[in-house]
């Protein structure tokens, strides 16, 4: 049922989905209280529309997380209909949902990384939909482009597996980095305080979000929303806004995090020197299948059969799509 409803939502023109939420957004615009900003952010990078892929590279090597996927290069992904920009400027990254495979075969998918990297700033990503379903492991994240993992850090902004009903926000780092926070957050809780990671032992420090609208089916059913990361010397702060609740200052291109209220995750500098653990971070968007997380978690997910059997069946991937409105970076 979830897949059928999500497929219906994904089949609708996104402009029409956005209009459903226009009245409440207009109300907020007229009743919003003006907030002064200590330092106004300036837009430095904007990824949207027909030129979206100009600023990204396609990863076409074996999945480092052990997923049952073939990550395609740009030409192959485009020809297979797995990476394209719609006429309404929505960027789509998909998993092959037509090919019947034998159990144990890899399914075609896409992983892209930004050509540019950053050492701080305000990152705002507006998604209309994200992949979800049995065996599916989508992620929108950042990783160092110059240091061997995990020494340059990894920032997982959106991540979950199978039919998870809430997002998980995680930092992975080298040694001597702890999540030491008593700051109140909204609809979330700390699930691990140890950020230090290594191959085979990499849970990282994380917040589990309890609002089902933050991930997967429920995210898609409300035409998605916005994730924001403010990365400063003092730490990293994350917000989530459902489609109806996106602040007008974000919509207007003049974001003011001081007016956004309680964040969903806060990683202060008090337990971790951010500058030495997180640097030269590139953005990454990908969807893998099974792998190191979705595979072991499959048996408790409520999905039928085995994870490899799910990968073989193309009907499991009709909603395994990223639908991206835009990604903006401010400094």
Image (cartoon, rainbow, N blue to C red):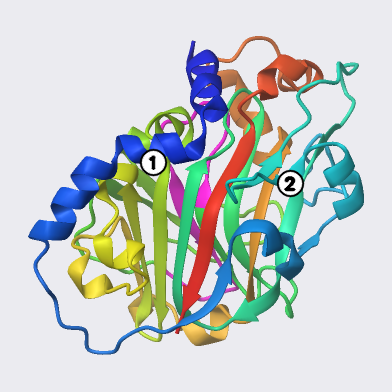
> Is 10 in front, or is 100?
10
Q: Is 258 positioned to the left or the right of 124 in the image?
A: left
Q: Write the residue at 81% across / 34% down.
A: 68
Residue that label 2 marks: 84
- Which secondary structure, mark 2? strand
* Range drawn in magenta: 158-178
Q: Would residue 221 be seen by someone viewing this image from the given angle? A: yes
Q: Which residue is mark 1?
A: 18
Q: Quadrant of residue 284?
A: bottom right
Instruction: Tell me, yes or no, whether the highlighted magenta stretch contains residue 143.
Output: no
Q: Position of residue 7 (x, y in %)?
A: 56, 21
Badge 2 crowding class, 10 Å Cα cut-off, few under 14, some 14 to 19, many 20 or more, is many
Residue 158 rendering spot, x and y as whole percentages = 50, 50
Q: Is residue 219 above or below residue 194?
A: above
Please tell me whether mark 1 sits on a helix, a strand or a loop: helix
Q: Which mark is residue 183?
A: none
- Residue placed at 26% from the left, 59% from the top? 247
Return the x and y of residue 248 as percentages of the image width and height. Answer: 26, 61
Total tally of numbered discs in the picture: 2
Residue 192: tell me if it is visible: no
Q: In the picture, residue 167 is in which quadrant? A: top left
Q: Nearer the viewer, residue 94 or 13?
A: 13
Tell me the residue at 86%/16% (across/down).
100
> In terms of sequence position, does the residue under pointer 1 or pointer 2 come before the other?
1
For image coordinates 25% across by 49% down, the residue present is 245
> Where, quadrant-wise, is the C terminus in this rendering?
bottom left
- Give yes or no for residue 161 being in the magenta stretch: yes
Q: Position of residue 213 (x, y in %)?
A: 35, 36
């Amino acid at each position: 049922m979830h897949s059928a409803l999500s497929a219906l939502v994904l089949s609708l023109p996104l402009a029409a989905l956005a209009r459903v939420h226009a009245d409440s957004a207009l109300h907020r615009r007229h009743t919003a209280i003006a907030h002064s900003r200590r330092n106004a952010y300036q837009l430095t990078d904007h990824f949207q529309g027909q030129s979206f892929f100009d600023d990204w590279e396609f990863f076409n090597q074996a999945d480092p997380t052990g997923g049952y996927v073939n990550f395609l290069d740009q030409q192959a992904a485009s020809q297979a209909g797995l990476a394209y920009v719609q006429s309404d400027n929505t960027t789509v990254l998909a998993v092959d949902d037509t090919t019947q495979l034998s159990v144990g075969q890899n399914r075609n998918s896409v992983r892209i990384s930004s050509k540019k990297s950053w050492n701080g700033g305000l990152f705002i990503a507006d998604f209309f939909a994200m992949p979800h379903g049995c065996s599916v492991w989508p992620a929108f994240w950042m990783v160092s482009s110059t240091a061997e993992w995990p020494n340059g850090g990894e920032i997982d902004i959106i991540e979950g597996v199978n039919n998870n009903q809430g997002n998980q926000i995680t930092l992975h780092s080298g040694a001597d980095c702890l999540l030491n926070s008593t700051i109140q957050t909204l609809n979330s809780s700390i699930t691990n305080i140890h950020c230090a990671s290594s191959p085979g032992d990499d849970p990282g420090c994380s917040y589990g979000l309890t609002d089902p609208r933050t991930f997967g089916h429920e995210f898609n059913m409300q035409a998605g929303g916005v994730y924001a990361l403010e990365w400063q010397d003092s730490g990293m702060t994350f917000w989530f806004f459902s489609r109806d609740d996106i602040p007008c200052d974000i919509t207007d291109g003049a974001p003011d995090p001081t007016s956004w209220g309680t964040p969903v995750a806060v990683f202060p500098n008090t337990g971790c020197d951010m500058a030495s653990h997180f640097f030269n971070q590139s953005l990454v968007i990908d969807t893998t299948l099974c792998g190191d997380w979705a595979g072991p978690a499959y048996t408790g997910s409520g999905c039928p059969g085995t994870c490899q059997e799910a990968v073989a069946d193309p009907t499991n991937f009709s909603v395994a799509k990223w639908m991206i409105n835009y990604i903006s970076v401010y400094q």
